[in-house]
Image (tube, rainbow, N blue to C red):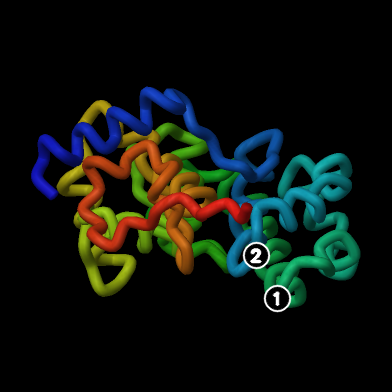
């Protein structure tokens, strides 16, 4: 896909949804960080259900430390890998209190030193909390970037580098949100719904699907 086509791809997405946001629910940067850590191998819907009561009780790292690992587990036990995630959330909260005055650092490298925070999580936090032009590559972004031809790569690092190099300036801040939403609701893994996709024309995917036939 050439640069002009990529521009048109994102222009169409921006026209449809000018200001996309994460579907995770949170009230501040710390809650965002916790929600993203909890969302690994889990759905945003599932995380939001688990954090609704948690975030009503916990707004700061200090409050999370006071809640404790067992207390946290009672809130997030419906989320996959909740034991490991609870341990990481308490550990990162302790570090934020001890080393960062209870604030989430606006630095991707520092974020990646926190327990349970990898490259994708750090990119999400930098983008959603601080407006950085980062590209968080989850399964949806990886699939859409490869399928559409925007950024082809065999691993998430290659796709992230491709997006960094190819996404035009006007669209960089929101690009990963558009790709996530497109992959989650339209460009699905098994049955992409190309027949109703807003970017079907510029997309390079050749095996485009057609609308399902109605039974008579």
Q: Residue at x 70, y 34 (%)?
A: 27
Please tell me the numbered disc located at residue 202: none
Q: Position of residue 65 (x, y in %)?
A: 79, 57
The reply to whether residue 86 is visible in this rendering is yes
Give the vertical position of 166 relative to 28 (above or below). Answer: below
- Which structural element holds mark 2? loop
In the rendered structure, are the residues bearing label 2 and label 1 in contact, judged by CB atoms less than 8 Å apart? yes
Q: Which mark is residue 42?
A: 2
Mark 2 or 1: in front is 2
Q: Residues within 10 Å of mark 2 (few under 14, many from 20)?
A: some
Residue at 32 percent across and 56 percent down: it is: 208
**Point 43% across, 26% down: residue:** 16
Q: Which residue is mark 1?
A: 81
User: Which of the marked residues, 2 or 1, is nearer the chain's N terminus?
Assistant: 2
Observer-nearest residue: 133 or 65?
133
Relative depth, front residue between 43 and 65: 43
Q: Is residue 195 above or below residue 208?
A: above
């Amino acid at each position: 896909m050439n640069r002009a086509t990529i521009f048109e791809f994102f222009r169409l997405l921006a026209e449809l949804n000018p200001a996309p946001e994460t579907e995770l629910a949170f009230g501040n940067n710390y809650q965002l960080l916790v929600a993203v850590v909890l969302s690994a191998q889990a759905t945003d819907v599932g995380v939001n259900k688990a954090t609704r009561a948690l975030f009503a009780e916990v707004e700061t790292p200090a409050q999370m430390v006071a809640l404790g690992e067992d207390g946290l587990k009672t809130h997030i036990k419906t989320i996959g890998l909740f034991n490991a995630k609870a341990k990481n959330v308490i550990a990162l909260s302790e570090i934020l209190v001890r080393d960062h005055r209870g604030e989430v650092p606006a630095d991707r490298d520092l974020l990646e030193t926190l327990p349970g925070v990898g490259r994708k999580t750090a990119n999400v936090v930098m983008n959603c909390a601080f407006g950085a032009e980062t590209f968080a590559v989850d399964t949806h972004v990886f699939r859409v970037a490869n399928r559409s031809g925007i950024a082809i790569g065999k691993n998430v690092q290659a796709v992230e580098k491709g997006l960094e190099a190819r996404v035009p300036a006007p669209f960089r801040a929101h690009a990963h949100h558009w790709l996530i939403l497109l992959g989650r609701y339209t460009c699905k893994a098994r049955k992409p719904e190309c027949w109703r996709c807003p970017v079907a024309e510029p997309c390079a995917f050749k095996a485009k699907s057609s609308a399902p036939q109605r039974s008579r």
